[in-house]
Image: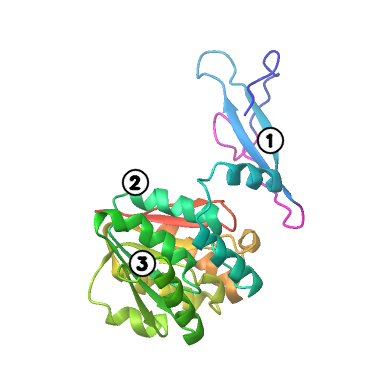
Amino acid sequence: MGGHGGGRPAASPAPSGDRPGGRLRPLHLDAGRRHGALYVLHCGPADARPLTTSLQEATVDSTALETYLQSLLPPADPTLAAIEAETRQARLPIIGPLEGQFLSVLLQAAGVRTVLEIGTAAGYSTIWLARAVQPRGGRVTTIERELDRAAWAQQNFQRTGLAGTITLLQGEAFALLPTLGQRYDAVFVDILRSLDGPAAAERLFALCLDRLAPGGLLIADNALHGQQVLSGPTTGSAGAVATWNRLASQHPALLFTLVPLRDGIAIAYRRE
């Protein structure tokens, strides 16, 4: 982002309730447009002179940004590209290569060996997770409710030669999670948008936290829910996602952040 232009702007008194050193203003996002506003607060040095601040606005075209980010990815894997095309034809949402690469870097940097995934779908995200942990002899356990999707995913694991690295459990996550006998270095949740409300999110959060090892990562996809979380929803799937973000961000054992990549990735680190 660019620096200051010209000289310092004139100082203005901070209104009541503002944080010392800078004025806080609400961030407005329009879900119907392709442009989002990013605001950065610049503060002058804390010296005897009046404190001076300026607010810069940088507008980013999300389509151009995604095109640029795509250009930085490694060469496309033919099998993954085929799965992308097949899921697109079937209208089945997947994380896509940008998020797949992000998760791969994250898991490898954290030294993750064991992953629990909730929401397999066609197994696309599972393949990214498995490839990230396989070099260290790691394994992925993944849960899928729908029988036809589980069968499709198993075929894709065979196609990529990862069937020996992945254990697929077919059934309801709420029923299966309490039966698992281990804790995992990372838990990846990809079913938030299918939850019917905050109560389901609270229950799922507790079950996932119970399966997360100290020092582990709790990761959830669709953490922005098409930006619907910005309006503070309290019902339906948007309310479920907002509840998940609140629980993860306020839990005393977790260090939380939300990355606004695609539909948002919520990441919480469990303190050891």
Is residue 203 among the parts visible in the rendering?
no
Give the image location of residue 207, x and y in percent.
35, 74
Rounded to the nearest whole Å, what is the CA distance between mark 2 and mark 3? 21 Å
Disc on res. 184: none
Q: Position of residue 93 (x, y in %)?
A: 59, 69
Residue position marked by numbered label 1 in the rendering: 58
Q: Secondary structure at mark 2?
A: helix
> Is residue 44 depicted above or below 216 in this figure?
above
Q: What whole-number distance in Å separates the C-alpha atoms at marks 3 and 1?
A: 43 Å
Question: Residue at position x 56%, y 51% from top?
Answer: 261
Query: Quick one: 111 or 9, which is closer to the camera?
Result: 111
* Mark 2 vs 1, N-terminal side: 1
**Mark 1 residue type:** Ala
Instruction: Give the residues in magenta.
Output: 15-33
Q: CA distance from mark 2 to mark 1?
A: 30 Å
SS category of the residue bearing label 1 = strand
Residue 30: in magenta span: yes
The residue identified by callout 3 is 162
* Proximity of marks 2 and 1: CB atoms separated by less than 8 Å: no
Q: Is residue 95 above or below residue 98?
A: below
In the depicted view, which residue is nearer to us: 161 or 94?
161
Residue at 36% of width from left, 62% of height from top?
130
Q: Which residue, given by chain and number where applicable, does mark 2 sit on?
A: 109
Looking at the image, is mark 2 or mark 3 earlier in the sequence? 2
Secondary structure beneath dot 3 equals loop
> Would residue 2 appear left or right of 74 to someone viewing this image?
right
